[in-house]
Amino acid sequence: MADHVLIQNGAIAIRLMQDDVQDYQLVAKWLTDQAVLECCGGRDNPYPLAKVLEKYKPRVLAKECVVPCFVLYRALAIGYLQYYSLADADRQEYGDYGVGESATIYGVDLFIGETSYWNQGIGTQTLSTALIYLFEHLQADKIVIDPRVSNTRATRCYEKCGFSKVKQLPEHELHEGIYEDSWLMVADRSRQMS
């Protein structure tokens, strides 16, 4: 699977998710774990294998603009990361931050699915590695992420990676039956590459 690795940075690697039952089963394992769901997606919204196949297979087969990836730590798959070119509707909602319509803006989402790897700085290392890939290899001008305001652990991680809070998005994400506010956070190529 080395040929599917997008980037390696020390112990962290990001590889493309494959159209393989083991990859789908791993996502289903993570997205049925109550601790993971509490942070990502909501405990009322588990993803057993059938639901994972329905949502993620089109992404893996490049039928959607979202690029699904696995986070590897010392060659072990421990989490999920996805990136995508920001759609026009999102650009209108989020704004362009003075870079103009021609700017290359990506969105990114991630979670560590193996809870034994939480609170070790691996999320920060992973996102920093993803930023290198998006800025250097895909020539992104800006990268956005939108954690729930209540997810302070994620927000702190993103700030460590160079993201800044730009604005609050009211009732942006449905989480466990409640529409919660999110932060729109932005990382800027010019600040990251200097």
Image (cartoon, helix red, strand yellow):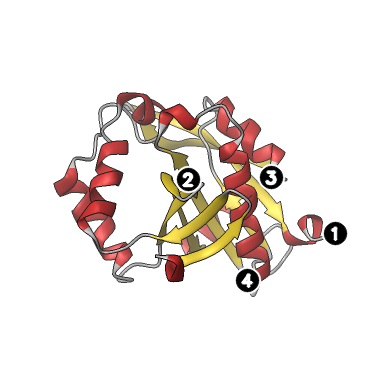
> Real-space Cα distance between discs 3 and 2?
14 Å
CA separation in Å, label 4 and label 1: 16 Å
Pointer 1: what residue?
194
Residue drawn at point x = 47 percent, y = 49 percent: 72
Q: Do the residues labelled 3 and 2 touch (CB within 8 Å)?
A: no
Q: Can you give x and y, in whole percent of width and height, for residue 156 in the image?
A: 65, 31
The numbered mark, 3 or 2, whose residue comes first in the sequence reads 2
- Residue type marked 3: Phe
- Name the residue carrying label 2: 110
What is the spatial separation of the Cα atoms under label 4 and label 2, in whole angstroms? 19 Å
Q: On the image, numbered disc 3 is attached to which residue? A: 163
Q: In this view, does 27 lie above or below 107?
A: above
**Cα separation between marks 2 and 1:** 25 Å
Q: Quadrant of the C terminus?
A: bottom right
Q: Between marks 3 and 4, how big is the CA–CA gap?
A: 19 Å
* Amino acid type for the residue under numbered disc 4: His
Mark positioned earlier in the residue sequence (3 or 4): 4
| Residue 168 seen from this side | no
Q: Residue at x 56, y 39 (%)?
A: 123
Mark 3 or 1, nearer chain start: 3
184 sits to left or right of 111: right
Q: Mark 4 points at which residue?
A: 137
Residue 64 figure quarter: bottom left
What's under tag 2, amino acid-wise? Leu
